[in-house]
């Protein structure tokens, strides 16, 4: 009888408790949204960064044309900017159709995807673990951690925030499948994984992540057995393999660094050091930059120390796997998800990048948070007091980091300040200063970049342009020659050199340089026109007339060409009679 008398109370209390927890979860979701949006609020005032934003967005014809069936087909049919990420291109096209080429709006869309991922992470972790506040803390760390500013504040990294959302959405669907195996949630997880892969190939490690979740917290390995769990993941692995092939095919022509440039020893050394660097930045996110130079030579002592640390941590979590399985799961999540971007297959010249830690960091946050909860299970108030300052510090650091992304000059000069021997940062800071008309500062940055890394054809060329602006044509021509030494196919440098030679009286060499330009650009009206001027100076009237007629045919509406042609058809003229093209 006592049990019967208590049952109505239990029945009414349980729904009441569920309602209360649901309400608290709703407040947590609202708090996460407000905190993340406030931390990134200034980014809607930021401009595009002329560092991949140009190739990805505002100079990409596929994107600037807006959303169309033709554009969607092309997004799938061929790589853009050496990347096969069709869903990201479609997302950019949709932005342009709705907002135009508006950098503030595009930044806002990135923030929206990041907010959605933060909320989804909280809801999914809560469902998997039953731990509301621990799940909220992990989600808040991901939402507010300054290491993620690059992924959110850089328009180019739309691929990162998109892939993270679909990664988590696939895990959420898989969690429902794990609770009650049915075809619909399994297919949903598979489709969402495919969408994540279409946004960025980083999602190739998702099948392994699902197996880790089967180990903890879903604990499916105890009831299903590993053979069945692996068999379930076969379609996911096939999707990952197909996307990996597309990604390698897209990158085949550019960006992949050869073994001749970076030896296997350098790659392994940097990979080991990078793992420890990511750990350091997760726990102490200071001096963050948008580009960290790759150490060209192996660092044996650092690499050996990093290897010993990684082995020690791996041994520790394996030893604790039975009593604290979350440590092994979180550690392997961190190590495994970083594999595609750790540098063993090097793409680009960075040593590591903040954006690469976007998904991997979740494993560390999970492991540490659950370890702390187990150590102090009855000290919720104390834990909340600790969590509050940590999240506040993250939010403040993120807000400050966002200010560095307002424009290219601010971003790269900040990168110069927090890194060493960063030729890329100096070069891009110089390019941004040059565009702003600050010639003196641009020259200073170019000189610093070229001292660190001399074999930069583009920077030698731009350095020469700036030297000409301050009345140093001879120094400018020397810079153009250096550009051609490192890249004989740099037609812009060759053209600027030809113009300088002509102006300085070295007409014979100027003619040779113009002829080489026309060998590659036979339909350049300006090159024919300038060659005609140089030939006329040397008294080669008939040759000059032929090139001028070609220029007139190629640019029939150009008044200077038409005027010069009328004069030359009447007889030889002085080169000074030729106006600038």
Image (tube, rainbow, N blue to C red):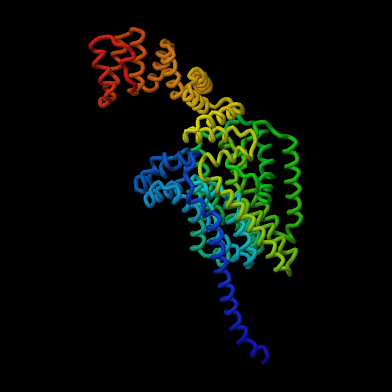
Outermost residue, top side: 539
Quadrant showing the N terminus:
bottom right
Of the pair 295 and 288, the residue shown nearer to us: 288
Residue at x-position 26% and y-position 17%:
565
Question: Image quadrant of residue 339?
Answer: top right
Residue at x-position 52% and y-position 28%:
459
Residue 26 located left or right of residue 58: right
Q: Is residue 323 above or below residue 532?
A: below
Quadrant showing the C terminus:
top left
Residue 72 located left or right of residue 259: left
- Residue 157: x and y in percent read 51, 46
Residue 337 located left or right of residue 112: right
- Residue 102: x and y in percent read 42, 48
Q: In this view, does 520 lie above or below 239?
A: above
- Residue 166 visible in the shown view: no
Question: Image quadrant of residue 525?
Answer: top left
Q: In this view, does 145 lie above or below 57?
A: below
Of the pair 443 and 132, the residue shown nearer to us: 443
């Amino acid at each position: 009888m006592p049990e019967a008398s208590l049952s109505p109370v239990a029945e009414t209390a349980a729904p009441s408790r569920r309602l209360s927890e649901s309400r608290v979860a709703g407040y947590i979701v609202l708090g996460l949204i407000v905190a993340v949006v406030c931390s990134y609020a200034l980014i809607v005032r930021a401009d595009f960064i002329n560092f991949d934003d140009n190739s990805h967005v505002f100079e990409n014809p596929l994107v600037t044309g807006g959303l169309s069936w033709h554009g969607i087909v092309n997004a799938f049919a061929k790589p853009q900017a050496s990347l096969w990420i069709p869903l990201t291109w479609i997302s950019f096209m949709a932005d342009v159709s709705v907002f135009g080429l508006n950098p503030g709006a595009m930044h806002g869309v990135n923030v929206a995807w990041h907010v959605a991922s933060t909320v989804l992470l909280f809801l999914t972790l809560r469902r998997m673990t039953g731990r509301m506040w621990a799940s909220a803390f992990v989600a808040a760390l991901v939402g507010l951690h300054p290491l993620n500013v690059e992924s959110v504040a850089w328009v180019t990294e739309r691929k990162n925030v998109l892939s993270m959302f679909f990664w988590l959405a696939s895990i959420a669907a898989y969690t429902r499948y794990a609770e009650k195996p049915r075809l619909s949630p399994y297919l949903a997880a598979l489709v969402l994984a495919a969408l994540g892969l279409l946004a960025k190939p980083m999602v190739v490690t998702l099948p392994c992540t699902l197996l880790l979740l089967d180990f903890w917290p879903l604990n499916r390995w105890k009831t299903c057995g590993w053979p069945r769990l692996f068999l379930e993941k076969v379609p996911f692995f096939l999707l990952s393999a197909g996307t990996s092939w597309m990604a390698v095919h897209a990158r085949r022509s550019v960006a992949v660094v050869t073994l001749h440039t970076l030896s296997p020893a350098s790659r392994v050394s940097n990979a080991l050091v990078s793992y420890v660097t990511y750990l350091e930045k997760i726990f102490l996110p200071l001096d963050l930059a948008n580009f960290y130079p790759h150490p060209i030579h192996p660092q044996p002592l650092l690499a050996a120390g990093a290897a010993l640390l990684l082995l020690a941590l791996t041994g520790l979590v394996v030893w604790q796997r039975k009593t604290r399985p979350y440590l092994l799961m979180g550690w392997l999540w961190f190590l495994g998800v970083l594999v595609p971007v750790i540098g063993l297959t090097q793409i680009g010249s960075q040593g590591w990048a903040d954006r690469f830690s976007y998904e991997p960091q979740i494993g560390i946050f999970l492991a540490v948070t659950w370890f702390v909860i187990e150590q102090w299970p009855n000290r919720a108030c104390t834990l909340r007091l600790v969590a509050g300052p940590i999240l506040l510090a993250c939010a403040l650091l993120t807000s400050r980091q966002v200010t560095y992304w307002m424009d290219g000059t601010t971003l790269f000069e900040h990168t110069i300040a927090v890194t060493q021997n960063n030729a890329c940062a100096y070069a891009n800071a110089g390019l941004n200063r040059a565009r702003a008309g600050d010639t003196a500062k641009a020259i200073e940055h170019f000189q610093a970049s070229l001292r660190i890394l001399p074999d930069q054809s583009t920077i030698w060329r731009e350095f020469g342009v700036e030297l000409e602006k301050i009345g140093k044509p001879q120094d400018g021509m020397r810079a153009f020659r250096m550009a051609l030494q490192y890249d004989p196919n740099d037609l812009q440098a060759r053209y600027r050199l030809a113009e300088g030679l002509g102006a300085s009286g070295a007409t014979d060499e100027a003619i040779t340089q113009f002829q080489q330009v026309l060998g590659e650009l036979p339909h350049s009206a300006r090159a024919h026109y300038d060659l005609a001027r140089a030939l006329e100076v040397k008294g080669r009237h008939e040759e000059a007339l032929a090139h001028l007629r070609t220029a007139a045919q190629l640019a029939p509406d150009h008044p200077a060409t038409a005027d010069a042609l009328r004069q030359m058809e009447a007889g030889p003229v002085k080169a000074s009679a030729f106006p600038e093209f």
